[in-house]
Image (cartoon, rainbow, N blue to C red):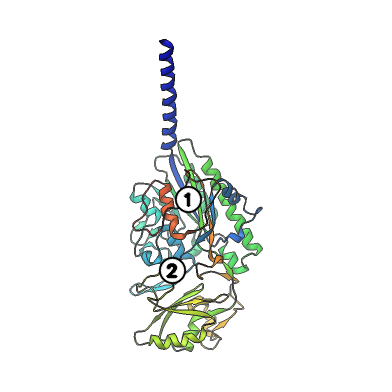
Amino acid sequence: MWGSVRAIGAAIAVLFLSVFSLTTAYAAERTVVVVLFDGFPPRLLSPSGTPNLNRIAKEGAWSADLVPAFPTISLINHTTFATGCWPEHHGVMSNEFYDPKLGKFGEAMQKGDADWHTGCEAMWEAAERQGVRAAAFNFVGRWSAKRGKLATYANPLVPWKDTPSDDVTLASALKLLKDNSPNHPRLIALYFRGPDEAEHEHGTVSPEAQAEARKADVIVGKLMAAIAALPKDREGTLVIGTDHGMMDVGPMINVTRLMNKLEIKGKAAADGASAFVYLDKDENEDRVVKALGDYKDMFSVYRKGHYPAYAHLGLSGRAGDLLLISRPPYWMADSSAFPPWAAWLGINWVWPVAFTPFIGGIKATHGYDPAMQQMHGIFYAWGAGIAKGKKIDRLDMIDVHPTVMALLGLQPGKPVDGRVVTEMMAK
């Protein structure tokens, strides 16, 4: 009899310990660190140069096909990454565009001001709304000129030249990961400069670009170590992405010169591989489209309402009456990209429409059709809740936000266009 009682007692004890262990594991508080490196294409990965990212490919989930929104350039994709929305919903159409009431986007600090958003919540806004503290460093949309900072921890919005360095941003993140006070954030979103600038200046596989990829990998390693060092009652997940890929290019199309040559009445906003053309009310659209057709070897022309299917840009006044998309290796710029002395030399009036700049040009850029492999970027996830050794064939930029929110156990922002990448989740 006593033996049976002891056996039953032992069984209950084992069951209690098992349940306690499961409850403790389940109750561990999860922190998600989200990293965006600017301009990190898969071609910059290497066995010796990116050992930490290579480690994640073995221990976590990864993809060489994170597909950006169009235009495949920075600010539109920083915002898409953070909100999970297509640009037709969040409102940031490119690095350069016009709003009928607000004027030109891109002046002073406007590029980072969340007041330019026409809808959609960034991941830090959605987290804070649901009672979870968040941090956002150097990301666009972390600050509102009218409402102030949009995350509990956010560095002020300043001109680009005054933006804190990657080292400062990393130090801020590591400090928050070590913070075990009740006020620590569970979402930490970090933007780093990445290889983008080096690729623009020196080319996609230049030693300078490879050096920046190695620097990015060091950042990844330090974040992994900090997550691994979290106390037992906390667990961490690292999510890494980029805003676009990169490809080597050739001649530049001067859109301002083009408009002057064809006597097009209106204004243009160009960057990367595309340009919006906003026609004056008394300009004849049919005439302009016909005139631009003489340059079909350089670019394609689309009317508003007939943009290509991959351009989720909508029909608002921010979308140009016409959209020009370069054919590689051409890229585009307008007069705002040129120094004053270039205008004095007649660059917008007498120079060729397309030429290779001898000063201030670039060797690589982005902004083309998102179906092009060169425009795709890297994606990695590691840590709590992530499957091990899982390759993801493809995910869209809009999918990052809802996936991060799911890892936090939260609902995505309102609204959201993306999906949770369930195939990367641990079962």
Please tell me whether mark 2 sits on a helix, a strand or a loop.
loop
- Residue sitting nearer the eye, 145 or 70: 70
- Residue sitting nearer the eye, 389 or 205: 389
Number of residue marks: 2
Examine the rendered structure and indicate whether residue 354 appears above or below residue 127. Answer: below
Residue 174 x/y as whole percent: 51, 46
Q: Which image quarter holds the N terminus?
A: top left
Residue at mark 2: 108
The dot on residue 124 is none
Residue 390 x/y as whole percent: 54, 49
Front position among marks 1 and 2: 1
Q: Is residue 159 visible?
A: no
Residue 344 x/y as whole percent: 53, 85
Q: Which residue is rendered at x = 64% and y = 54% of the image?
A: 49
Q: What type is the residue that disc 2 sits on?
A: Ala
Examine the rendered structure and indicate whether residue 160 appears above or below residue 150. Answer: below
Q: What type is the residue that disc 1 sits on?
A: Glu
Residue at mark 1: 423
Q: Which residue is rendered at x = 66% and y = 53% of the image?
A: 48
